[in-house]
Amino acid sequence: MRLEVGNIFINDIQFADKTKVDKGVLYVNKEELAELLKEDEHIASVEFFIAKPGDSTRITPVKDVIEPRVKVEGAGGIFPGVLSKVDVVGQGKTHVLKGAAVVTTGKIVGFQEGIVDMSGPGAEYTPFSKTCNLVVKAEVVDGLLQHAHEEAIRYVGFKTAKYLGEAARDITPDEVHTYETKPLREQIAEYPDLPKIAYVYMLQTQGLLHDTYVYGVDAKKIVPTIIYPTEVMDGAIVSGNCVSACDKNPSYVHMNNPVIHDLYKLHGKEYNFLGVIITNENVYLADKERSSNWTAKLAEYLGLDAVIISEEGFGNPDTDLIMNCKKITAKGIKTVILTDEYAGRDGASQSLADADVAADACVTAGNANMIVDLPKMDKVIGHTEFVDKIAGGFAGSLREDGSIQVEVQAITGATSEVGFAYLTARTF
């Protein structure tokens, strides 16, 4: 598959009478957008806010972040199986409003929702302090059950991103990047002397608001499979989970997965990047065994020399991570694991819930238990009353003066396990 990604740089967002892109500014007709979103009978109200880098603004509880994109050529549309038909995507041309993001907030659904500060020390931990954000505060009708609440707000984010993405359809991109992965036999033949590499992409699927969707299918219902890396860029994988904010992969991160982008950079030079194996993170032992067995089988079937394995979340998924690592290593395939750590506030506790000698090459995104102080912001979008309850918060986290003390666990994207963040750690 060959995909051209055309980036249209956005350096500002403004409300206007017409939704359009002009000279790097995204103009948004919020009345028209509100009408679209309120077509869903589950949505009681929507409000729109603009949060720019450097603003004294706090957004919480953050549910998802999505990048506006639009398919301009090729099969399917953005977010296949969710908002578009279930066509195979990842080829043709896609335009991106690079620098813009949709951030969803509203009353809390699950306790693992996050904080984004647009300035101050908190901004140093989240990548979404650097984007021009259209924040959608959506509230649902009374009596809506928790899972339906999550779904309604999830679709608010996707619809908004698709609506904004349409403004990029006829714009000439500022830059174009081309990504290509050929059918397996052709791809191997093209670089026969280079090591064969793949990416094992673990998706959060523990249920109870810990879900990820592949072409609209709840990924806990799949067995591990192979996809083209470019499919991910067209929204084939989207978030629907409330895992801890620091290491959750928002939909924006799936669409911009840096592991995939970095593997393409040296593809054909230092190694042959064959593709992506997606797998899930289940709760029950039998499901974990099944998925890790299949993941190792697929790695062997592809004749791989090495894999990179990333997880999403911590604790229970650490077992899936180590199972994948052990079983793939046992096939004679080299492994590198990507994770973060929950090593206690002093950094002295065991970092992962599981470990094995096979996991001897590890990249860490830092310690999620580290305490940070976030000063009062002039503007708060959302609901701060939940700060004491979210993962990483505790009784007294929200102070009377509006400042907050939390673990970095509470900050959206702070310890991204695919590296879409600023933290890491070193062993001395």
Image (cartoon, grey):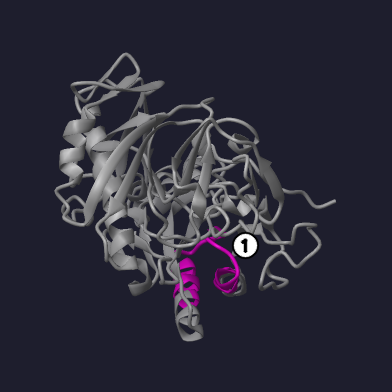
353 or 153: nearer the viewer: 153
Q: Could you tell me residue 340's position as x and y percent?
A: 64, 56
The kind of residue tagged 1 is Lys
- The residue singled out by tag 1 in the image is 334
**Residue 186 in sight from this viewpoint:** yes
386 or 342: nearer the viewer: 386
Tell me which corner region of the image, top left, top right, bottom left or bottom right, holds residue 14: top left
Is 426 on the left-hand or right-hand side of 194? Answer: right
Asked whether 299 falls inside the magenta stretch, the response is yes
Q: Looking at the image, which residue is at 35% across and 54% down?
A: 238
Is 350 on the left-hand or right-hand side of 267? Answer: right
Q: Could you tell me residue 277's position as x and y percent?
A: 43, 62
- In this picture, is 301 found above or below 423? below
Asked whether 9 falls inside the magenta stretch, the response is no
Q: Could you tell me residue 17's position as x and y percent?
A: 19, 21
Residue segment shown in magenta:
292-321
